Image (tube, rainbow, N blue to C red):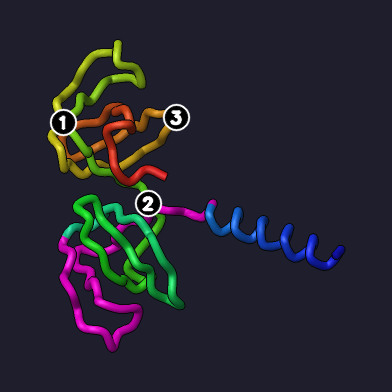
């Protein structure tokens, strides 16, 4: 009986630790192959041509990660093509603010699908940048934040 308790507790903590791993990663390169299966022997399903695109990891197998993107495209990518996420995509039209408050000065209107680089986050706000702006967005309107 004592052994079963240890096994159950071990499984619980292992599951908890595994579930707390990073859920989002981003593409490291300008060209990334997405495959039908977890290996180089599988054919290429499609190719991403967008560096820093955030993707959600939904499965692991050896050195490959099964991912899904903001448009529900999925496939397998080698881990060498991924890195820790520091980007997000605007999931609906939103406003970029000067500070982490909806009462601060609005800087720009960002359209759905806009890729942004994350500088830092606090609660539901992230300081982000693109080629033209630096400001804060509410992450309730963003895809890719851990």
Marks 2 and 1, how far apart in space? 22 Å
- The residue singled out by tag 2 in the image is 85
Quadrant of the rendered image containing residue 93: top left
Which disc is residue 47 wearing?
none
Which disc is residue 93 wearing?
1
Where residue 26 sits in the image (x, y, percent)?
32, 56
Depicted 18 relative to depicted 35: above or below: above
Quadrant of the rendered image containing residue 73: bottom left
Instruction: Give the mark nearer the N terminus: 2 vs 3.
Output: 2
Tell me the SS state at disc 1.
Answer: loop
Tell me the SS state at disc 3.
Answer: strand
Quadrant of the rendering where the C terminus is positioned = top left
Q: Nearer the viewer, residue 98 or 78?
A: 78
Stretch in magenta:
20-49
Which disc is residue 122 wearing?
3
Marks 1 and 3, how far apart in space? 21 Å
Disc 1 crowd rating (10 Å Cα; few below 14, some 14-19, many 20+) is few
The outermost residue toward the bottom is: 41
* Residue 32 included in the magenta stretch of the image: yes
Tell me the SS state at disc 2.
Answer: loop
Camera-side mark, 1 or 3: 1
* Residue 57 included in the magenta stretch of the image: no
Camera-side mark, 2 or 1: 1
Q: Nearer the viewer, residue 82 or 16?
A: 16
Where residue 30 sits in the image (x, y, percent)?
20, 63
């Amino acid at each position: 009986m004592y052994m079963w308790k240890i096994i159950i507790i071990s499984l619980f903590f292992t599951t908890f630790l595994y579930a707390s791993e990073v859920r989002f990663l981003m593409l490291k390169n300008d060209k990334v192959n997405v495959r039908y299966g977890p290996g180089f022997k599988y054919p290429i399903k499609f190719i991403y041509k967008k560096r820093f695109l955030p993707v959600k990891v939904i499965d692991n197998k050896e050195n490959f990660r099964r991912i899904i993107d903001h448009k529900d495209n999925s496939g397998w990518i080698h881990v060498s093509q991924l890195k820790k996420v520091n980007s997000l995509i605007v999931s609906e039209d939103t406003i970029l603010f000067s500070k982490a408050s909806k009462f601060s000065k609005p800087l720009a209107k960002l359209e759905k699908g806009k890729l942004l680089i994350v500088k830092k986050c606090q609660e539901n706000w992230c300081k982000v940048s693109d080629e033209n702006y630096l400001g804060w967005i509410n992450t309730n309107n963003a895809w890719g934040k851990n």
